[in-house]
Image (cartoon, grey):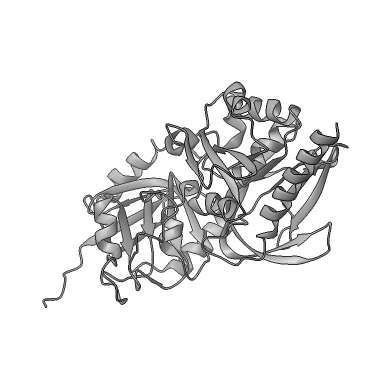
Amino acid sequence: MKYLTPKPAVLVLQDGTVFHGHACGAIGTATGEIAFNTGMTGYQEIFTDPSYYGQVAIMATAHIGNYGTHPEEIESETIKIAGLICKKFSSFASRYGKDIVSLQKYFERDNKVGICDVDTRMLVRTVRQKGAMNCIISSENLNVEELKKQLEKVPSMDGLELSSKVTTRDAYFAGDETSDYKVALIDFGVKRNIIRCLTERGAYVKVFPMDTTLEEIVDWDPDGILLSNGPGDPSVMAGSIDLVKRIVATNIPVFGICLGHQILALSQGLKTEKMHNGHRGINHPIKNLVTGKCEITSQNHGFVVSAQSVSANAEIEVTHVHLNDKTVAGIRLKNKKVFSVQYHPEASPGPHDSRYLFDQFLENIKQGKKDLIQA
């Protein structure tokens, strides 16, 4: 077999920093907000996570693509990252199986552009010091000055609504329709494993588009409502914020995850803010303030609920905090069966420390049904 001749590629950051490397994936140009992930495994799940829509992912681990891709290791049907930056990219899959496809072919299928042979340690340090910023990757145009002009036209993630790009267009079902528990899931960019974590616990799930009406949800008569993860700035999602505010008023148990957590907070008068560089990885420490226990979690977010706005609201309690920077990682409404977390309890990839939150949600549903019977 002949060796593949690497094609040159260039990465330009918004601050003017330039990195040279080689092309991986499709040949072309990609733009978006740069974000680094510290996870050492599960790259296919990360690349297909709808929360990454519009972002160029830096993989902090040194080798990407070694074990190829598999059709069961996805969180959505297509690659959602805007582009990829990595140190070493393997064009060949070192894993047996008839369904294994190389990451190179996987990226070519979805026409996704990447750059490899980049000093990712230096790049991550740059993002940590200077904060999240836009970038451009190109393997078809190596003229840095032209790329800088093109990069100037890329919109900031701050103020950008993206959930409408990844939400389902039509409602669909998952699980056993004879189940005793029905969960309505509002899809802001849901990961498949969230749905799986619900159906594994016996729930019958109906996934609704993000622009669905409260009347459509209530007509299905759900026992609980889950607000999914998703991409973009939650503060500009006025329609979704209003919908969640009305959902909370129904007294149906609610569980919010990541973007769903942020939208829930905004619906209750709290505020969100853009983070310096965000939390992305599968090794983030969280403390549960209710139980006193700590858990290692999977995270992927660039916005966070303002701690100051929570402290000013007597009806909301902080239930979880991020131990690295003390940011708000979970809240609950004191007078309702409504709670949310900033991280990913379904953790795909990642540890299973936080799966208990799905059990907690189902317990709230069971108690809610008992309260209705007694009433």
Q: In the rendered picture of this protein, how many numbered marks are placed on residues? A: 0
Q: Is residue 4 left or right of residue 271?
A: left
The one nearer the camera, 348 or 178, is 178
Q: Can residue 273 be seen from the camera position used here?
A: no
Q: Is 27 drawn above or below residue 4 in the view shown?
A: above
Occupied quadrant, residue 237: top right
**What residue sits 28% from the left and 65% below the top?**
99
* Residue 12 x, y percent position in the rendering: 37, 52
Q: Is 172 drawn above or below residue 106 in the view shown?
A: above
* Residue 122 x, y percent position in the rendering: 47, 67
Q: Is residue 317 left or right of residue 157?
A: right
Q: Residue furthest front?
A: 178
**What residue sits 24% from the left and 60% below the top?**
105
Q: Residue furthest left?
A: 2
* Residue 61 x, y percent position in the rendering: 46, 71
Q: Is residue 290 left or right of residue 182?
A: right
The one nearer the camera, 233 or 158, is 233
Of the 4 image quadrants, the one containing the N terminus is bottom left
The one nearer the camera, 320 or 256, is 256
Occupied quadrant, residue 250: top right
Occupied quadrant, residue 271: top right
Q: Is 243 drawn above or below residue 366 in the view shown?
A: above
The one nearer the camera, 144 or 268, is 268
Q: Can residue 371 be seen from the camera position used here?
A: yes
**What residue sits 32% from the left and 57% below the top?**
114
Q: Residue furthest right?
A: 314
Of the 4 image quadrants, the one containing the C terminus is top right
**What residue sits 84% from the left and 42% below the top?**
311
* Residue 297 x, y percent position in the rendering: 63, 62
